[in-house]
Image (spheres, coloured by chain):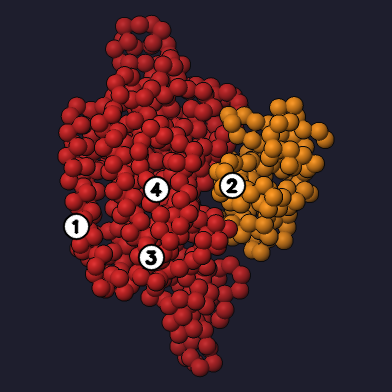
Chain colours: A red, B orange
Amino acid sequence: MAIESGVTSALEVEQDYEKHIKDPQAHRTMVLNMGPQHPSTHGVLRLLLELDGETILKAAPDIGFLHTGIEKEFEVKTYQQGVTLTDRIDYLAPLSNNLVYCLAAEKLLGLEIPPLAQYTRVMLAELTRLNSHLVWLGTHAIDIGAMSVFLYCFREREEILRIFEMFSGQRMMTSYFRIGGLALPHPRGWQKRVKDFIDIFPSRIDEYEELLTGNSIWMGRTKGVGYISLEDMLDLGVTGPMLRAAGLALDVRKDAPYSSYEKFDFKVPTSTVNDVFARYQLRLEEMRESTKIIRQALEGMPSGSHQADAPGIVLPEREKMKTQMEALIYHFKIVTEGFRVPAGEVYQTIESPRGEVGCYMISDGTQKPYRVHWRGPSFGNLQAIPRLIEGTLIADVIAALGSMDFVLGDTDR
Amino acid sequence: MPLPESLRDNSTAAALADLVTAGKLEFGELTVEVAPGNILAALGRAKTSLGLNRLSTITGVDRYPAEPRYEVVYHLQSMTTKERLRLKARLPGDHPEIESACPVFRAANWYEREVFDFFGVRFLNHPDMKRIMLPEDFEGHPLRKDFPVTGTRY
């Protein structure tokens, strides 16, 4: 059987398999279903692979198993309620998603965000990058067979999640960034917690490197595997570490700095080797750079308010609400009907751990967005899968897919 | 149609001037509208002569009950100057159809399938024009404004 165009049903694949078993000679190629429950597809990606022996002739990704209609749901929620939906899109980088959504709405509203909130946003967005890269490294290593790295990565990730919980009260679905600033003021004792973490973290990265970088099995499985040319990647819409590992320093943090990233001193690591191993090294380098950004944010944290001075948009302080009539009215109005956003459209992008996240927001002047479109980096990256794995061996698929670091919630939305 | 006053000194808009039907520069973002028939010409020129060689995303907007009802929106970016451009084409409510951007950008493939899935806009000469997220037997296009948010009936 050959994959014609697009995707074949599971039944056809099964019939094909039976035919192949009965008469392997007459049936030269065979179609294999990989996923949607395959552990190395990290979620519910279905891949159809047409095989000749162990060589992949054709690959067809099938997505949509995790589609939850989030873009539709934005249209019936007020702007502030929409923040909670963004957590659930890319569930490994909730704060990056909060950030892009808030930045888009703030652009429409013309809000000025105080420096303290901007620095906190940068710091937590970078912690999110560490969080996401740690999950990536752990699962990527476990796919290839290095069991223990996973446990080490999750040890550090646990500490990051505790920091998130300290700030927002939630480990994963944080919703900590709100339109107009932050949901809550800083918690007591956060500086020590973050400082302890970033003091120890660089040595932990060395530990991962000790386990993997010189490991001959790891090198054998990743070096020279998963090559795809830079031109192909650009044309297919790939962004993020994949692109940077091919030598193009595309990073929204540098190209169009948001939330005061221009005040931070950091490098955008690139590599020209362009294989699975290079992507691994690049992400480790990104983790080191993120640690530097977090340290700068921690040491240079400005003082001031955590929310913008915009009475109709941000909720008044609890104390004022109980003593001032006006604050009480604002509180009631914001909670019951939301706030109006001037008509217009913006396309805000940021650099998430996986690449460029875009939030295209259209307002018609009411309390609810007219349309929100989410440009997920995983969706763009997944389009390159056939180009990435066609012609390679089936054993390399796992390594190549892992190096891509996609999240299906982000793809299917 | 002449360019709007505010875009006269914008080089990107000027380079597309003969195709542009409307345009604006808001929040530092350039939006240019072209007739649906000219979309391939506009995308091709943006890619080759303006250097806007990366397609960030394609999406749709439903302006129901206004006419023309649908908008197809393309976000492009230049890899050298990092500047962005938003291209738009408006399509009528019945039989919305537009040429596929796949010959210019291969990345358009999935984005156009998504717009077809959610809005029912057909892309002509698309290599694989079918639903991408929803099951094949799904009825209706959920991001249309007349599609209910709750309930099971379309």
Pointers 2 and 1 in contact (CB under 8 A)?
A: no
Distance (Cα) linking label 2 and label 1: 39 Å
Q: Chain of mark 4?
A: A
Residue at 47% in and 70% down: A389
Q: Are marks 1 and 3 on the same chain?
A: yes
Left or right, A193 with reference to A89: left
Pointers 1 and 3 in contact (CB under 8 A)?
A: no
Question: What's under tag 4, amino acid-wise?
Answer: Val
Q: Are marks 3 and 4 on the same chain?
A: yes
Pointer 3 or 4: first along the chain: 4
Using the image, determine if residue B37 lies above or below residue A364. below
The spot of residue B142 in percent (x, y) is 59, 46
Q: Chain of mark 3?
A: A
Q: Are marks 3 and 2 on the same chain?
A: no
Pointers 4 and 1 in contact (CB under 8 A)?
A: no
> Which residue was labeled with disc 4?
A268
> Which residue was labeled with disc 2?
B78
Tell me the tag on residue A412. Answer: none
Tell me the tag on residue A276. Answer: 3
Indicate the secondary structure of the residue bearing disc 4.
Answer: loop
Mark 3 or 4: in front is 4
Left or right, B92 with reference to A18: right
Q: Chain of mark 1?
A: A
Question: What's under tag 3, amino acid-wise?
Answer: Val
Question: What's under tag 2, amino acid-wise?
Answer: Ser
> Which is more toward the observer, A1 or B79?
B79
Distance (Cα) linking label 4 and label 1: 22 Å
Residue at 69% in and 56% down: B100
Distance (Cα) linking label 3 and label 2: 27 Å
Left or right, A8 with reference to A240: right
Using a 10 Å C-alpha cutoff, classify the residue at mark 1 as few (fewer than 14 neighbours), some (14 to 19) or many (20 or more): some
